Image: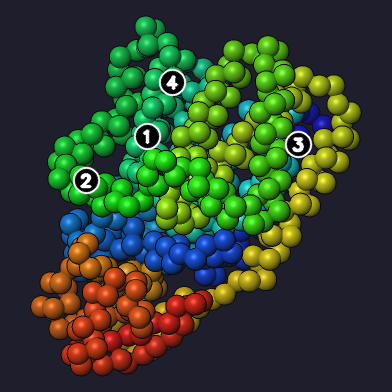
Amino acid sequence: MSLKRKETRYHVIFLVLWLVAHIPFLRSDPSIMLDSSRGAFTDEGLYLFQISNWFKGAGFEVFESDGFLKTPFYNLLMAPFIAFNRLWLIRLITVLFLGGVLSTWLADFGKNMLLPMLLCLMISLQVNFFGHSHLAMAECYVFGFLLLSLRFVFHTNTKQQYWGLFFLGLAIGCKIQYVYLGLLIIPYLAWIGIKHSKGYRLLLSAAPLLILGLLGLIFRAEYNYILAFAKSGKMQEWGHWMFRMKVNGMHLWETPFNVFLSVTTILMIAGMGMNWKKFERKSKWILIVLLGLLFIEGHKLLYIYLPQRYLYVFFGLVMLFHVYGVHLLLKQAKLKSWLPILVGILFILIPLFSYCQLLNQRSFDMISARESIKLNVSPDMHLIGPWGPSLSFGLTNPSHTAWKEFFENRAYWQANSKHVIVSELDFNDNQKLFSKTIQGGSYCKIDSFQIIKWELGVFTP
């Protein structure tokens, strides 16, 4: 069998296994194996509902939430699929996107592709990474475009290297909290060679970054407000960093596979150090960039509030570092052809236990809740509250979020009679914004349901 045909077969196998692993989760609730946050449940809707409302005929209002401004490129990329109003479709597009990106990246390994491919599949089953790779989350696209960016800068010819800057801009624009990825511009330009760069190519490749800069100028006050609110009380103060890293680290090490990854990461760094002189210049640059990104993403271990979705890109980078490191070590070693296969099979058995756990723990409470709302709420009623946007998928009802002192959107539920409030019964999801209104008797409960551990009610004026 020719090398090209063999590589094609590996691509097909990888994509089939990737899809088969994720398809059972396209309609299920997000997994919260390591997370007590409702974020994965509500965020799928919160970042997309403004575009969704426009397709539902309720207009587009950029200032009613920070969702669109935080994730402008993600919203624009998803807009054609939001039009179909099916969450499972948006999730499927995400799975296909990630699978295609990883497959394209693995193609650069040539004849040494098999073991890196098996290792990639194994580490992709890590609960934080796997559990979010089939959700409608902007972080998935940040990671995917970041990987494409690295691939084009370091694995293509000079004319194509400029695409690295283009995809880097898309990664940042998919969620602006990752603006620090802009630090990669310096090593990118250093590698491409700024003195030999074509000005027009550089300008075109920087188009997404320039658009983001323009958005920053136009919505400067809004971005300042969003970022100031996001930083408030999030980072552990200096002097208690070790304590916070220990708390967050111990939480992550509750799963044996995460402990295994921690050990193997240290071993991989040691292996890279011992073989450093043997590596090509390009390989050294890639390793430095990957380790630098891991260090930067590791700052999230200092967060007082650390939902597991925040670590999605971090664990994606851990996977890339392992896979690329094994690829380099394979090039240095003379291994029998059967050995990579054996090692790969043994390794991929390790995370299968956590995958089986996720498979067995699947729930479909969100689907049941949507069916309940469909039966009890008129299709032209607006759903108000943090849960409203995610629960509106598949329904004709427009939705609007609302929190106390942060995008309260009172015009939608105080001046508009055609609405219902969807809230947890203890009102913690909206920071007690609706507690006095509902408990004061202005609203009556017409429906209730439970989503995992949260009890919700639907209230009408």
Decide which of 9, 242 is in the foreground and name it. Answer: 242
Decide which of 269, 128 is in the foreground and name it. Answer: 269
The amino acid marked with disc number 3 is Leu
For residue 60, above or below residue 193: below
Q: Residue at x 71, y 38 (%)?
A: 264
Residue 161 location in percent, x, y? 46, 21
Q: What residue does disc 2 label?
A: 223
Confirm whether residue 17 shows in the render: no
Residue 439 location in percent, x, y? 24, 88
Q: Which label lies toward us, 3 or 1?
A: 1
* Mark sitting earlier along the chain (3/4): 3
Q: Residue at x 58, y 55 (%)?
A: 251
Residue 138 location in percent, x, y? 41, 51
Q: Which label lies toward us, 2 or 3?
A: 2
Q: Residue at x 62, y 40 (%)?
A: 319
Label at residue 115? 3
Query: Which quadrant holds residue 281?
Result: top right
3D distance between C-alphas at marks 3 and 1: 32 Å
SS class of the residue under badge 1? helix
As drawn, which residue projects farthest toward the front? 239
Label at residue 377? none
Residue 6 location in percent, x, y? 76, 34
